[in-house]
Amino acid sequence: MRYASGHKAETRERVLKEAAKEIRAKGPDNVAVAGIMARAGLTHGGFYAHFPSKDVLVKEAIGTMFVDARKRTERIDASGDPRAVLRAYVDFYLSPAHRDSRDRGCPLPTLSGDFARSKPDTRERFGKGVVGIAGRLAAALSRLGYAEGEAHALLAQLVGAVALARAVGDAELSDQLLAHTHASIVARYGLETAQ
C-alpha cells in the first residue's frame, strides 16, 4: 500500500500529540508506548519506524507540549497593550479550567518534578520550553519597565500556584490558592483595569 508523501510525518506528529497528552496526564515514567500508539490508531510494532526508543519519544514530546502551549496563547501575544497581555495570561494560567486540564495545560506545573530527575538532554529540552515561556512574559514585562529577571519570578509564582492547587485534596483550598495568587499578581503589576 502506497501512502501520500507526508504520511510518515503526519503519523509521527499524531504519535507525538498523543504522547504529550499522556505524559502530562501520567508523567514520563508512567506511560506505555503500546497505549500511546493505540490512541494514535497505530500498532505497537509501528513505533520503531518513528522513534528509536521511549526516551527519544519523551524528549520529542516535550517540544510538542511547548508548541501546543504556544498555540493556545498566540492571541494573548498578539495584543498590543502589555498590561492586557499579562492580565489575559494570568487569567488563563490561574483559572480552574487550566488547573483541571492536566493533560492539555502548560507542562511546567505538571512535569517540573518529573523532569528534574530526567537525563540531561531531556532536561535541556524542558529548559528550552521554560526559556520560551519566560521570554514571552519578559517581553510584556519589559514594556512595563521591569527587568528581565522579573519574568522568572512571575513564572515561578504561576507554576507554583497551579502545581499546589492541583496537589491539595481540598477543593476550597485549591480555589483559594489560585484566587490569592491571581489577586497578588494583578495588584503587583497594576493589572486591575486591564482586560
Image: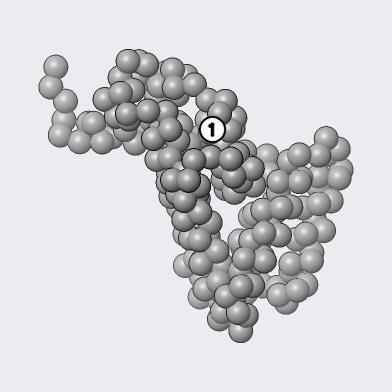
Residue 129 in percent (x, y) is at: 49, 54
Q: Residue at x 51, y 67 (%)?
A: 135
Q: Is residue 74 above or below residue 36?
A: below
Mark 1: few, some, or many residues within 10 Å (few <14, many ≥20)?
many
**Left or right: where does residue 37 sit relative to residue 153?**
left
Nearest to the observer: residue 83 or residue 122: 122
Q: Quadrant of residue 185?
A: bottom right
The residue furthest left is: 2
What residue would you read off at disc 1? Answer: 28
Q: Residue at x 16, y 25 (%)?
A: 3
- What amino acid type should be assigned to the residue bearing mark 1? Pro
Q: Is residue 25 above or below residue 45?
A: below
Nearest to the observer: residue 83 or residue 156: 156
Q: Residue at x 40, y 21 (%)?
A: 37
Query: Is residue 66 at all visible to an observer of this figure?
Result: no
Residue 38 in percent (x, y) is at: 42, 18
Q: Residue at x 32, y 30 (%)?
A: 51
Quadrant the C terminus occupies: bottom right
The residue furthest front is: 120
Q: Is residue 135 above or below residue 100?
A: below
Quadrant the N terminus occupies: top left
Query: Is residue 114 at all visible to an observer of this figure?
Result: yes
**Left or right: where does residue 3 sit relative to residue 157?**
left
Q: Is residue 186 above or below residue 128?
A: below
